[in-house]
């Protein structure tokens, strides 16, 4: 409960925090678990209390790209908007780091909107943050080199895990960047030669701070 109580909008409303725990189902998931699939019906929204999740968009041809991460205290605004409009999910949500998640039923979402302005502020703030992150993703794809995007992704993972050593494959990085595995492998080798990281078996160690 401490994680939610630290969120700006919730600090002045312990009653809201209590209701979120009362109305929600609390579950724990290991890394790699799928929380929501594309085209699935949305019946509740996830609020992360510990760990992290990632939101991915894929196309019919199999290409995928990472949209953003969801950290402790945050929720998936795309799930919220889709659920409120009775739409199926347009994204896939997976656990990046072992996570503890509150699942709040959709009917309770609208109820809390009416009863607590703090909850409405939280939703607006979440929407604004995700919108900015999506703009950043679009700008990165359009204007930044793949090696810059790759290094930025590694630093984001370092921040999430609080570790300079990342357990991840070249294939996973390629999927999240929306590029080919061969491209990622070549760029990682170049970054290693430049002294920015060290490569191991399914392991990458960042040598320099961001």
Image (spheres, rainbow, N blue to C red):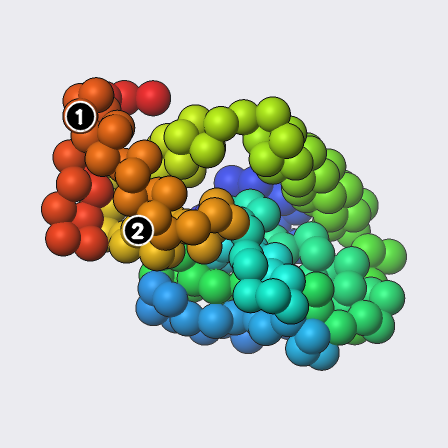
Q: Which residue is mark 1?
A: 193
Task: Determine which of the numbered discs, if any, sits on residue 22 in the image.
Answer: none
Instruction: Write the residue at 73% across / 60% down.
Output: 80
In the displayed structure image, the side of residue 201 where residue 12 appears, left or right: right
In the displayed structure image, the side of residue 161 where residue 20 appears, left or right: right
Residue 113 or 92: which is nearer the viewer? 92
> Which quadrant would residue 47 be assigned to in this image?
bottom right
Q: Quadrant of the C terminus?
A: top left
Depicted 162 relative to depicted 66: above or below:
above
Disc 1 from disc 2: Cα separation: 17 Å
Q: How far from the left and from the top, in percent, is residue 106? A: 75, 70
Depicted 142 relative to depicted 199: above or below:
above
Count neighbours of disc 2 (C-alpha within 10 A) and say few if under 14, some if 14 to 19, many if 20 or more: some
Depicted 108 relative to depicted 149: above or below:
below
Q: Which residue is mark 2?
A: 170
Residue 142 or 117: which is nearer the viewer? 142
């Amino acid at each position: 409960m401490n994680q939610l109580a630290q969120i700006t909008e919730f600090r002045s409303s312990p009653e809201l925090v209590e209701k979120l725990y009362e109305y929600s189902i609390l579950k724990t998931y290991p890394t790699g678990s799928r929380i929501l699939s594309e085209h699935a019906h949305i019946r509740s929204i996830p609020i992360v209390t510990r760990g992290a999740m990632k939101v991915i968009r894929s196309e019919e041809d199999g290409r995928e790209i990472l949209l953003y991460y969801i950290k402790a205290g945050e929720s998936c605004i795309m799930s919220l908007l889709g659920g409120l409009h009775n739409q199926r999910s347009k994204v896939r949500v997976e656990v990046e780091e072992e996570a503890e998640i509150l699942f709040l039923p959709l009917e309770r979402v609208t109820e809390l909107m009416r009863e607590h302005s703090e909850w409405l502020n939280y939703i607006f703030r979440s929407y604004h943050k995700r919108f900015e992150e999506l703009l950043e993703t679009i700008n990165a794809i359009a204007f930044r080199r793949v090696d810059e995007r790759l290094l930025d992704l590694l630093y984001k993972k370092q921040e999430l895990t609080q570790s300079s050593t990342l357990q991840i494959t070249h294939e996973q990085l390629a999927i999240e960047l929306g590029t080919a595995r061969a491209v990622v492998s070549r760029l990682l080798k170049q970054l290693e030669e430049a002294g920015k990281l060290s490569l191991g078996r399914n392991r990458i160690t960042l040598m320099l701070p961001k």
